[in-house]
Image (cartoon, coloured by chain):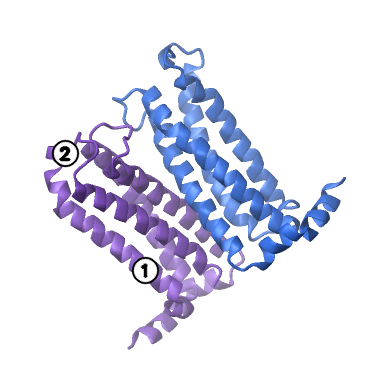
Chain colours: A purple, B blue
Amino acid sequence: MDLLSFFQSLEETSIALAIKEGDSFFPWLESIHVLAITLVVGTIAIVDLRLIGYPSHRRGARQLIVELLPYTWAAFVVAVITGVLLFISNAVKYAENPLFLIKMGLLVAAGLNMAVFHVGAYRKITEWDDMLPPPASARVAGASSLFLWICVIIFGRWIGFS
Amino acid sequence: MTLQSFTTWLYATPFATMIRDVPWIIPSIQCIHILAITVVVGSALVSDLRLAGVLARDTMPNAVVRRYLRWMWGALVVLLITGALMATGEPDRVLTNSLFWLKMGLITVACLLTWFFRRPLLHPEFKLEHARWRPFVKPAAWLSLAVWVCVIFCGRWIAYTI
């Protein structure tokens, strides 16, 4: 089965039809999706700004990351679940939408950026925990993350207009 | 002048017509609007959870509030401007929408909560543990978070109701 017919069959599931044809499922999912994304990006931005060198409510970068990451992940899970449900309601159209594909690419890039940070600068965080500004590798990670997530939001909003 | 005649007049102004007719204006304004919401949500989450006694309990609440309040006011100004531009473009869909006015009411409540329970903390000699309204700090923090969540839901739903 190719990808397109898989998306087609997703669209025909009863849950996808309910979201598509119901009056209020879609806006409810969208609202939760927006709330979750603002929580994801809001908490990530605080960490990113600290990595770039802007002081936070925590002196140490590690403590800030450990403190906020659970909220980021919890909100991210909600954003993915609601995002998948929004996607299956019109899977083929979204899969063919370049803006949607760019958004997915940006999410992958944000994930890779985070992975690089975790195996790189984060391993030696005890050496720069209290340093302001942090080392270049951490500043680059923070700036790229902030840029990628801002783009995720911009492309996400534009999907609704395409 | 009634709201109806004001709406009709505003709708017909060249400025409102331009916002409606130039295709990239509304999506761009909405992107900036959502990005500003992430700033409010991130700041509100950290400062409210601190005041609620959930997050960063070993730091001074004054320090946390001082750090995030400026971001919050800054983002609110951006939200006010972008929101006003969206309402100017489609006053017939916004100003006559009861959800829009509910949203404005909720924002007023959130701002009042911020003004009464957070702004005093900016004073260098203020001690939260000596404040007469100490018992209300926690409930006010939870209420503030709940109000912001409702504001986001109202915002998304305005697009679906006339």
Instruction: Tell me if residue B116 can be seen.
Output: yes
**Of residues B55 and A135, which is closer to you in this image?**
A135
Dot 2 or dot 1: first in sequence order is 1
Host chain of mark 1: A
Name the one closer to the observer, B85 or B57.
Answer: B85
Q: Amino acid at mark 2?
A: Trp
Residue topped by disc 2: A128
In the image: residue A43, left or right of residue B111: left
Marked residue chain, label 2: A
Give percent across and percent down for residue B32: 52, 53
Amino acid at dot 1: Met
Q: Nearer the viewer, mark 2 or mark 1?
A: 2
Asked whether the residues under the numbered discs 2 and 1 touch, taking CB atoms below 8 Å apart as contact, a structural biologist would say no
Say which residue label 1 marks.
A104
Could you tell me which secondary element the residue under label 2 belongs to? Answer: helix
Dot 1 falls on a residue whose secondary structure is: helix
Image spot of residue B151 (x, y percent): 57, 45
In percent of the image, x 46 and y 48: which residue is there?
B38
Q: Is residue A119 left or right of residue A52?
A: left
The outermost residue toward the right is: B1
* Residue A156 image position (x, y, % from top left): 46, 63
Q: Is residue B149 above or below residue A5?
A: above
Q: CA distance from mark 2 to mark 1?
A: 32 Å
Determine the residue positioned at 78% across, 54% down.
Answer: B10
Q: Residue furthest bottom?
A: A1
The answer to whether one can see residue A24 in this image is no
Q: Is residue A17 left or right of residue B96?
A: left
Q: Residue at x 25, y 58 (%)?
A: A113
Q: Residues within 10 Å of mark 2 (few under 14, many from 20)?
A: some
Give residue A46's quadrant in the image. top left
Q: Quadrant of the N terminus of chain A?
A: bottom left
- Position of A124 with respect to A70 (left or right) is left
